[in-house]
Image (tube, rainbow, N blue to C red):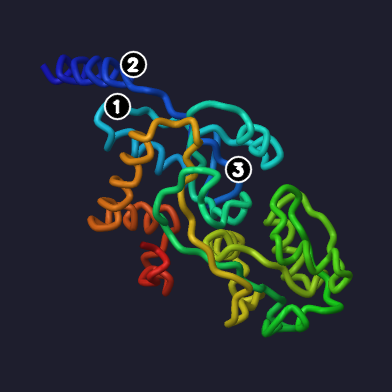
Amino acid sequence: MRLLWIVLALLCYSVITSAAQVIEMVSPYDTPPFVVDQKKEQGLVYDLASLLTVRSQGKYQFKVVVVPRVRLQKILQRSGVYVVPLVSPKWFGDGDEKKYLWTSALMEDENLVLSPRKRALEYESPASLQGKRTSIVLGHAVEPVQQLEKAGMVKAESTQSFNNSLRMLARGRIDFMVMGRIVAVYLIRDLGLQDQIYISDKTIERFDRKILVSPQSQKDLHKWLEGEIQRLRRSGEWKKYLRAELSLKNCDLAADPQFI
């Protein structure tokens, strides 16, 4: 009898998902905690896609597609229905949010200035970074650091991953690097570098992480997403996902208001 119920449940799920409208959730992130394992479909982006799919009750099926930022820019130029999760409007030259459709913020984030603990650096202004060495991860350049490099204020070398950059920082091969708080907290703990890396009290910039909805998408999709985000924030369900994925139960950041 139990087997019969399982089969029936699977059949019902198959019917619901086959009737759902498939929405590509295009992620420019290939790093934890946003994408932890592509093959196993683990990470915040996958969690968000699954959560929204379930909450749509058969209306939408969100399918994660991870692409480099260069390819994402080409996707943004084409017509079609898709969403880009957990990004900031200013990264797409859309500070007034008129070029694309945007939801409310799912979380707040900020770019931190990290340095070797033995040569701790307190960030005050761009001038405090002048003459320093840093690292830029290919495909993940932070605009303020790019501007400093172009102005000749800092020297930057390229690396293949945030992990490489953090290890270089811990060994003192570079003087500082800039990373989003959510990625930094996850990776520093994952690499066991808590005692080797210093985080400046003052941040370079703060920003909201929202969902970009393609202009060609139906207004219904944007309206539905906005409503779900508001409900997730009120219920605290999204915060539970963040706690689970970021392992924040024993971390001071668990109560931080940035995790809405």
Cα–Cα span, label 3 and label 2: 27 Å
Q: Is residue 222 above or below residue 153?
A: above
Q: Amino acid at mark 3?
A: Pro
Residue 118 on image: x %, y %: 73, 83
Q: Earlier in the sequence, mark 1 or mark 3?
A: 3
Q: Residue 252: x percent and y percent?
A: 42, 74
Q: Is residue 196 left or right of residue 158?
A: left
Q: How many marks?
A: 3
Q: Secondary structure at mark 1?
A: loop
Q: Residues within 10 Å of mark 2 (few under 14, many from 20)?
A: some
Q: CA distance from mark 1 to mark 2?
A: 10 Å
Q: Residue at x 40, y 72 (%)?
A: 256
At x 55%, y 32%, the residue is 65
Does residue 174 appear to the left or right of 235 in the view shown?
Answer: right
- Is residue 181 found left or right of 54 in the rendered image? right
Instruction: Name the image quarter holding the N terminus.
Output: top left
Residue occupied by mark 3? 28
Residue at figure coordinates x 51%, y 51% from the top left: 97
Q: Residue at x 68, y 56 (%)?
A: 162
**Toward the viewer: 2 or 67?**
67
Vertical placement of residue 142 versus 1, above or below: below
Amino acid identity at mark 2: Ser
What is the CA distance from the residue labelled 1 to the residue labelled 3?
A: 25 Å
Look at the numbered discs 1 and 2 and tell me whether their residues touch, using CB distance below 8 Å.
Answer: no
Task: Name the mark on residue 18.
Answer: 2
- Whichever of labels 1 and 2 marks the residue nearer the N terminus, that label is 2
Residue type at the position of mark 1: Lys
Q: Residues within 10 Å of mark 1 (few under 14, many from 20)?
A: some
Which residue has dot 1 on it?
A: 59
User: Percent position (x, y) of residue 88?
Assistant: 54, 54
Q: Return the mark for residue 176.
A: none
Dot 3 falls on a residue whose secondary structure is loop
